[in-house]
Image: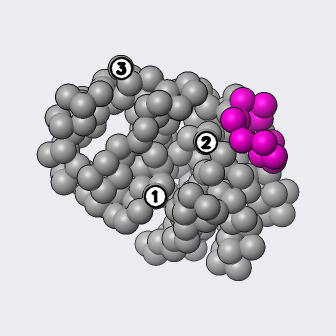
């Protein structure tokens, strides 16, 4: 498996291309991501959103049309892809698949697992492929997603962090902003964040 990443837009939101078994999975195509994605995929399978915030979904619609592949978005965040964004000019997009909480998909043997961790926003999820977890804005290297945005919920974030603490495996975390970390490393920080909310 190979992972390509490029920070996009003024918020430097990580867009990922995960290539495995000659299949390309696009995760969180943010602002102006289309050209980079088009240059770096050979067999794109789908577009996957960790959540619905504008800086993670900006290029959804353009890539759907150019690549003719389906878009997968957590069901609770579908409303953020259109008029609910607090940023003007967001190109609206419509998912082909509204992902249920903790749903898993199998692409000819390549499993893509969504794991629901609301708090930063209602549909906030991580996406697991192989030994990697793409955490969007749920958890970062020594930090967590903000809970002071529209539709954020600090109590939900506390519950999500408690759930995160119970994961009994380790994977490399590729967050929506910044560099990588691991599940085990961030589990050690979870109590601090829970107490600070």
The image quarter containing residue 64 is bottom right
To which residue does mark 1 refer? 177
Q: Please, which colouring scheme is shown?
A: one colour
Q: Quadrant of the N terminus?
A: bottom left
Q: CA distance from mark 2 to mark 1?
A: 13 Å
Residue 17: give its label. none
Residue 41: x percent and y percent?
66, 74
Residue 92: x percent and y percent?
80, 42
The magenta region covers: 81-93
Q: Nearer the viewer, residue 35 or 172?
A: 35
Give me the residue at 69% from left, 59% from top: 31
The answer to whether residue 141 shows anywhere in this view is yes
Give me the residue at 24% from left, 36% from top: 193
Q: CA distance from mark 3 to mark 2?
A: 19 Å
Q: Is residue 65 above or below residue 53?
A: below
To which residue does mark 2 refer? 53
Q: Is residue 18 above or below residue 107?
A: below
Magenta span: helix, strand or loop, mainly? loop
Give me the residue at 46% from left, 46% from top: 137
Find out whether residue 88 is within the magenta segment: yes
Instruction: Report crowding for label 2: few under 14, some 14 to 19, many 20 or more residues within 10 A (C-alpha).
Output: many
Q: Quadrant of the C terminus?
A: top left
Mark 1 vs 3, N-terminal side: 3
The answer to whether residue 131 shows anywhere in this view is no
Instruction: Report crowding for label 1: few under 14, some 14 to 19, many 20 or more residues within 10 A (C-alpha).
Output: many
Residue 79: x percent and y percent?
70, 28
Residue 155: give its label. 3
Q: Secondary structure at mark 2?
A: loop
Give me the residue at 70% from left, 35% from top: 85
Q: CA distance from mark 1 to mark 3?
A: 23 Å
Find out whether residue 159 is within the magenta segment: no
Mark 3 vs 2, N-terminal side: 2
């Amino acid at each position: 498996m190979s992972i390509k990443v490029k920070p996009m837009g003024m918020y430097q939101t990580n867009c990922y291309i995960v290539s495995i078994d000659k299949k390309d999975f696009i995760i969180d195509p943010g602002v102006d991501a289309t050209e980079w994605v088009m240059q770096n995929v050979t067999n794109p399978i789908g577009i996957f959103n960790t959540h619905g915030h504008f800086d993670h979904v900006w290029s959804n619609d353009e890539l759907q049309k150019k690549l003719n592949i389906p878009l997968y978005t957590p069901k609770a965040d579908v409303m953020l892809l259109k008029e609910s964004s607090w940023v003007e000019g967001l190109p609206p997009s419509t998912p082909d698949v509204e992902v249920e909480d903790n749903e898993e998909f199998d692409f000819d043997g390549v499993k893509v697992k969504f794991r629901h961790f609301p708090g930063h926003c209602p549909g906030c999820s991580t996406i697991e492929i192989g030994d990697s977890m793409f955490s969007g804005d749920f958890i970062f290297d020594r930090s967590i997603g903000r809970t002071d945005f529209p539709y954020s919920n600090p109590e939900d974030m506390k519950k999500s962090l408690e759930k995160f603490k119970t994961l009994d495996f380790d994977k490399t975390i590729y967050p929506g902003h910044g560099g990588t970390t691991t599940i085990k490393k961030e589990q050690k920080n979870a109590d601090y964040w829970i107490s600070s909310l």
